[in-house]
Amino acid sequence: MNIIILDLEWDSAYSVRHQRFVNQIIQIGAVKIDSECKIIDTFSVTVKSSLSKKLTRRFVELTGITSEQMREGVPLTKAVEAYNEWAGTGTLTMTWSTSDLYTIIENCKYLLTPATRFRIEKYADLQSYVQNQMRAVGFELKSQISLSGAAELLNISVEGLELHNAQDDCLLSVALLKRFYDSEKMQAYIKDAANPEFFRRLSFKSYTLSNIKDDKIKPEHLVFKCDKCGMVAKCVTGWKYRNGWFSANFRCSECKKMFIGRVSFKKTYDDLIIKKKIAQPKAVEKKDENAVQRLPEKV
Ligand SMILES: [Zn+2]
């Protein structure tokens, strides 16, 4: 299977229509390689912004792309269509970290019509793959590292590569992949990006529930057992919410022990993650009635 290393350059511009800043794609760069990491073809297109005539100074300094070059570019829709045609089918697309995918999501949402979508069939995060391979050979990497950071640690330079005009980022990516290329090991990183679920999952932001009346919270989630005798205890107050945790006072109907039950709910794309703990009440507890969330009375 051929692999495409995709690299996007984007700049922030204000969209009057959406009343917000959008990270608009200004350049699409890509390199197509075979299963021996040999470069087969390259792709580069500069996009003419539909939002602004000028690029930010930071972007110009970072990429070397001038506002003039941007204005001579092609509209985003045309650029994506050209890319899709170049990409073809039956390939694996890789990017250094998933941030390019978030940019794609944003551009699809604000700047493209649903008819125009980046053709990404299979996807793997090159950063995640390379970093894990680096760890396996003894590098201590705590956080995500940049492409150039990884190249520096591995003493990889772009010199000696056969191409001169393709984007440095793509060439560095190819060099890094070549160092750790192992089609068996890579299998575990490959995702089916053609399935709409892939981008839905990516767009989903997990969050903590802060309203005790949320439909996702079921009565059984709020049941606590006495930590002394194991019997189901009775909730004797309303629920207070603070720092991601709900808490309420409980009294054991068997041994009369009082305790505080704490519970937190985190909604992820797939699950509701519930954590529970029991705390011992302080001798004097201040009343804070305003913060109390009461469940509707059950008849
Ligand atoms: Zn008890």
Image (cartoon, rainbow, N blue to C red):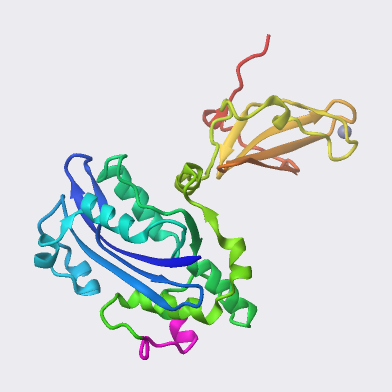
Q: Is residue 193 left or right of residue 288?
A: left
Look at the image and say whether residue 152 sits in the magenta stretch: yes
Residue 221, by quadrant, is: top right
Q: Is residue 193 visible?
A: yes
Look at the image and say whether residue 31 sits in the magenta stretch: no
Whether residue 165 is situated above or below residue 293 in the rendered picture: below
Of residue 78 and residue 244, the one placed in the foreground of this image is 78
Q: Residue at x 67, y 27 (%)?
A: 218
Of residue 236 and residue 88, the one placed in the foreground of this image is 88
Measured as percent of width and height from the top left, residue 59 is found at 22, 67
Whether residue 39 is situated above or below residue 218 in the rendered picture: below
Measured as percent of width and height from the top left, residue 285 is found at 66, 37
Q: Residue at x 88, y 35 (%)?
A: 230
Of residue 126 and residue 10, the one placed in the foreground of this image is 126
Measured as percent of width and height from the top left, residue 8 is found at 32, 63
Residue 4, by quadrant, is: bottom left
Q: Which residues are magenta?
A: 150-161
- From the image, give the main secondary structure of the stretch colored magenta: loop
Q: Is residue 4 left or right of residue 82?
A: right
Whether residue 193 is situated above or below residue 229 in the rendered picture: below
Residue 184, by quadrant, is: bottom right
Q: Is residue 142 visible?
A: no
Q: Residue at x 37, y 78 (%)?
A: 171
Question: In terms of image quarters, where does ligand 1 lie?
Answer: top right
Measured as percent of width and height from the top left, residue 69 is found at 12, 67
